[in-house]
Amino acid sequence: AAERRPLVAGNWKMNGLKASIGELDAVIAAASGVGRCDLMVCPPATLVAAFAARAAGTPVAIGGQDCHAEMSGAFTGDIAAEMLADAGATAVIVGHSERRTYHEESDAEVRAKALAAWRAGLTAIVCIGETKDERVAGKTLEVLGVQLAGSLPDGSTATNLVVAYEPVWAIGTGLTPTAADVAEAHGFIRDRLMARFGAEGEGVRVLYGGSVKPSNAAELMAVANVDGALVGGASLKATDFLGIAGAY
Ligand code: PEP
């Protein structure tokens, strides 16, 4: 089986001011002791450059939360993958459910953003996940299959792609799927990755996201094909984030 080093990535969403760099400092200070997993912090775009400068030469990577598909142009308010790379990011989240919902991003747009990430030399962290209605209707795997087929570009590899499975109903709600449900979803995602990308697909890290906290991180990490976590709310406090990372 492929060696997959776990990744614990924090998605700060629209939270954080310059003064929040103390939380990053606390993560950096503890990072070498965490050891077994890679650590990444994805602050709002306004903080990427400052955070990347602070994290340079440490084990903590910095990522963006979204990018535009184009390299430059008349797209007021948008940010190109090249700009994130220029600011020191090494990865970018694309297709987060909040982007898919509030900005109506389609699988095709998410795929274009992942390609933009690669063009800029960034790893694309592609998010997928079913809604509560879709789960109740028994359509979870069908939905994940459609999102994977539409959102992942050809040419995905173990290093240019990370997939985050985030059930929409578990994000920010305190609810999590059972270990069996997580195992089923991650096993399905792994099968699809290997069917399409072969050995590279076996090496792609598949993160679980949705109400991960220090108290449930170990149970989630013990599930087959869970290669780390994408953490929202609990990533804002270094102590919680490090508590999660300690389980991986
Ligand atoms: C997320 O938005 O990526 C997420 C997992 O959020 P939370 O951990 O707050 O549920």
Image: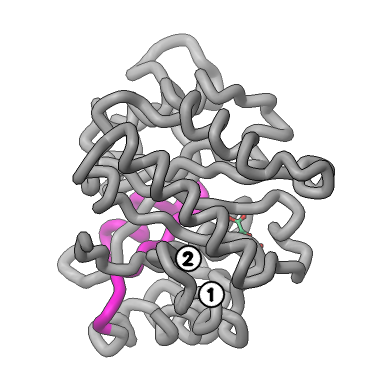
| Residue type highlighted by circle 2 | Ala
Report x, y in % for residue 243.
Answer: 49, 86
Please rate how many residues cluster around mark 1, counting C-alpha atoms within 10 Å: few if below 14, some from 14 to 19, many from 20. Answer: many
| Residue type highlighted by circle 1 | Leu
Q: Name the quadrant containing residue 235.
A: bottom right
Residue 43 in the magenta stretch? The answer is: yes
Compared with 232, 145 (above or below) is above
Which residue is the site of mark 2? Answer: 229
Instruction: Mark 2 vs mark 1: give the one in front.
Output: 1
**Residue that protrudes farthest toward the top in the picture:** 74
Compared with 197, 24 (above or below) is below
Which residue is the site of mark 1? Answer: 220
Q: CA distance from mark 2 to mark 1?
A: 9 Å
Mark 2, ligand 1, within 8 Å: the answer is: yes
Identity of the residue drawn at 73% across and 33% down:
102
- Is residue 16 visible in the rendered structure shown here? no
Instruction: Decide which of tag 2 and tag 1 comes sooner along the chain.
Output: 1
Identity of the residue drawn at 78% across and 64% down:
173
Query: The magenta stretch spans which residues?
Result: 35-55
Report x, y in % for residue 203.
Answer: 25, 53
Identity of the residue drawn at 54% across and 52% down:
165
